[in-house]
Each structure stands twice: as C-alpha cells, then as structure tokens.
Amino acid sequence: MSEKIEVLITEEQLDKRICEIAEEITRDFGSKDITLVCVLKGGVMFMVDIAKKLKQKVEFEFIDVSSYGNNTVSSGTVTINNGLETSIEGKNVILLEDIVDTGRTLSHLIKYLKEKNPASLKLCTLLDKPSRRVVDINADYIGFTIPDAFIVGYGLDYAQKYRNLPYIGILHLENQ
Ligand code: 5GP
C-alpha cells in the first residue's frame, strides 16, 4: 500500500484563518482570562498557533484522548488516558480540537469538563466534518468545514506519521 497526500489547506490559508478565529475569540472574551484545553496529540499545533495570537492572559491544559488507534476509522470508543492536571472550576475554558468527525470525542469531553464546573465552556475546532456526525454537536468556533476524507498534517496523524506537515492534506491509501 502506498500513501499519497493531496494538499487540502495550505500553510497560508491555515495562518489566515487562525488569525481570524483568534480575533473573534479576543473580541468575545474581552478582558476575561482564558484556559485553553488542548486535546492531545492532534490539537497541539493549533493550540500553539492560536495561543500566540490571543490578547488575553492564557493558561494551557491538556487532555490525552484516544479513539483511532492505527486506523483511519474511529473505534467509536473514547478513552481519556490522562485528564486535566489542575482545576478549571470558575475558569473560562475553550476546548481546542483538531477535528470533529462523529462528534463522540467532543461530546464525551464536554461532559467530562462540565462536571468540573468551569465558569464557561466554548468549543473550538480547526476542522469540521459534519457529514460524518453521529452525535449532535456544534462547535462555537470552526476553522474549516471539510468533506468526508481522512486528513493528515498540522498535528493530525496516520499511525503517528505526518503530524509535522505544515499544511492539511487528504491521505490516499493506494494499492501499488
Ligand atoms: P470523533 O470522536 O469526532 O469521531 O473524532 C475525533 C477525533 O478523531 C479527532 O480528535 C481526531 O483525533 C480523530 N480524527 C477524526 N477524523 C480524523 C481524520 O480525518 N484524520 C485524523 N488523523 N484523525 C481524525
């Protein structure tokens, strides 16, 4: 099987859109401090880039979640391998996802985070694949709405590869 990557979103397009989302968040939150909760590992690049553009005081938190293993199809089971390290009680939280596909991960994480009593909880995803949704979930901030394809790059992997690509691509698996 050979792996080919077709560019879907360029580095320049990513940069422009992330600036726009950061401006929107900055406007919405005003002088309130923000706690960014990054979903590992796919959300790392997005978190770093967006955090640099926010004007508020920002704290970082991470949640380690798995649902895909080494496949291109979700296992359907969401496991929190490592949860939050510090309390988010009374804080203004933005949950940062790389991609919303079926919506199962986000719905699981919303429940997990709400139980910790944040002052507010907003959802921000770089990519949205609405055609694949099985749980009714809508993000407050969406980078790009994309077609039903398996995506790699800019934090997203296939079997742990391609996370470091500076652009977003569609992975094509082809028989040689
Ligand atoms: P969901 O629970 O919404 O089905 O999936 C969310 C998680 O599955 C994402 O955080 C991401 O890790 C993974 N995922 C969903 N679609 C893709 C994709 O196209 N490419 C990659 N690399 N991961 C995906």
Image: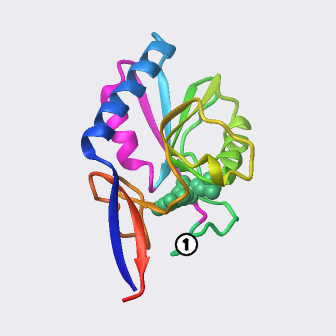
Judge from the rendering whether residue 3 lies leftward or rightward of residue 85; answer left or right. Answer: left
Q: Please state which of residues 7 and 48 is positioned toward the viewer in this rendering.
A: 7
User: What kind of residue is marked 1?
Assistant: Gly
Residue 16 occupies quadrant: top left
Is residue 83 visible in the rendered structure shown here?
yes
Residue 17, image x, y percentages: 36, 32
Residue 86 occupies quadrant: top right
Residue 134, image x, y percentages: 74, 53
Q: Secondary structure at mark 1?
A: loop
Q: Please state which of residues 172 and 14 is positioned toward the viewer in this rendering.
A: 172
Is residue 105 visible in the rendered structure shown here?
no
What's the magenta region? 41-67
Q: Quadrant of the N terminus?
A: bottom left
Inspect the magenta stretch and tell me whether residue 51 lies in it: yes
Residue at image position (30%, 51%) is: 167
User: Is the distance from the Cβ of mark 1 to the nearest ligand 1 atom less than 8 Å?
Assistant: no
Q: Quadrant of the C terminus?
A: bottom left
Inspect the magenta stretch and tell me whether residue 172 lies in it: no
Return the residue at label 1. 69
Write down which quadrant ligand 1 falls in.
Answer: bottom right
